[in-house]
Amino acid sequence: MPSAAVAAEEATPGVKGGWYRQACGANFDVVWLPNTATAAAVPSPAAVAQLAVKKLVLPTPQVAMSPGVGVPQLVGVPVWLWLPAGVWGPVSATAAVPGVSVTATASPREVAWDFGDGGVVSCGGPGTVYRPGVDDPAGGSPDCGVVFARSSVGEADGRFPVTVTVRWQVGWAGAGQQGVVAGLTSRAVSSVVVGESQALAVPASGGAR
């Protein structure tokens, strides 16, 4: 141990530490060092935000349309597209470590309906639910719909694939800071049959032949 005079000069009052023998070749000295080896560094809010993002549970979108998924669609007939209730809305998760708590929030921004060769439709919202007996079946959706230009004949299994992808914007806040991270996506897949109605011209009775 060093002398009382050295201890009074080098020790830091109120901070736990210890005396260490510091050697350099044949020379050595005794120094006092605080206990930093076992002191855990507090992670930054941005680092804790990544933990919060990993805890986010995004709802899985579902394919909803009118006419329904199981009903063959027709070329040239408007089809309404929408996401069921509960799929479109902010989702949050919180991560915390001693001294830092951060909440990450994912908000839906866009939904893409990909019908393969049948076309792609991007909508800025969940779409409008079709109401039988209220909405005009011959009219298109006010905000999210598709009109197929050709039939799915010739496609695999005679169907167009349907992939619904929701794109989420993700931000975080905590410990007096905030920021954004890379966006997330959630996805659902299905398929649909698209047919083409055939018109048959029948001459009027008594007409020229």
Image: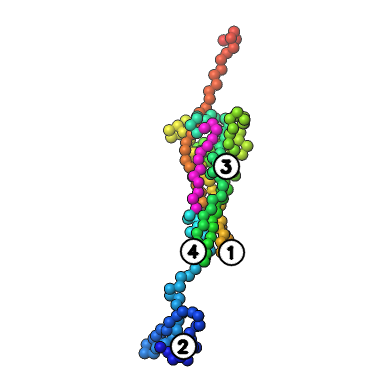
Few, some or many residues within 10 Å of mark 1 (<14, 14–19, 20+): few
Q: Residue at x 59, y 12 (%)?
A: 204
Q: Which residue is mark 1?
A: 176
The N terminus: image quadrant: bottom left
Q: Measured from the top left, where is residue 83 in percent x and y? A: 54, 40
Between 17 and 169, the one nearer to me in the picture: 17
- What is the crowding at mark 4: few (fewer than 14 residues within 10 Å), some, or many (at least 20)? few
For badge 1, the amino acid type reads Gly
- State the SS at label 1: loop
Image: magenta residue range:
56-68
What residue is drawn where x is 56% and y is 64%?
175
* Residue plotted at (54% across, 19% down): 200
Q: Earlier in the sequence, mark 1 or mark 3?
A: 3
> Would you say residue 120 is visible in this rendering?
no
Q: Which residue is mark 2?
A: 7
Q: Nearer the viewer, mark 3 or mark 4?
A: 4
In percent of width and height, residue 183 lies at 53, 53
Q: Alpha-carbon distance for marks 2 and 1?
A: 40 Å
Q: Magenta stretch: dominant SS? A: loop
Q: Which residue is mark 3?
A: 126
What amino acid is at disc 2?
A: Ala
Residue 97 has which mark? Answer: 4
Verify CB contact (< 8 Å) between mark 3 and mark 4. Answer: no
Q: Are discs 4 and 2 less than 8 Å apart at CB?
A: no
Query: Quadrant where the C terminus lies?
Result: top right
For marks 2 and 1, the one nearer the N-term is: 2
User: Which of the 4 quarters of the picture holds residue 123?
Assistant: top right
Distance from label 3 to label 4 (Cα)?
A: 36 Å
Indicate the secondary structure of the residue bearing disc 3: loop
Residue 92 percent across, percent down from the top left: 53, 53
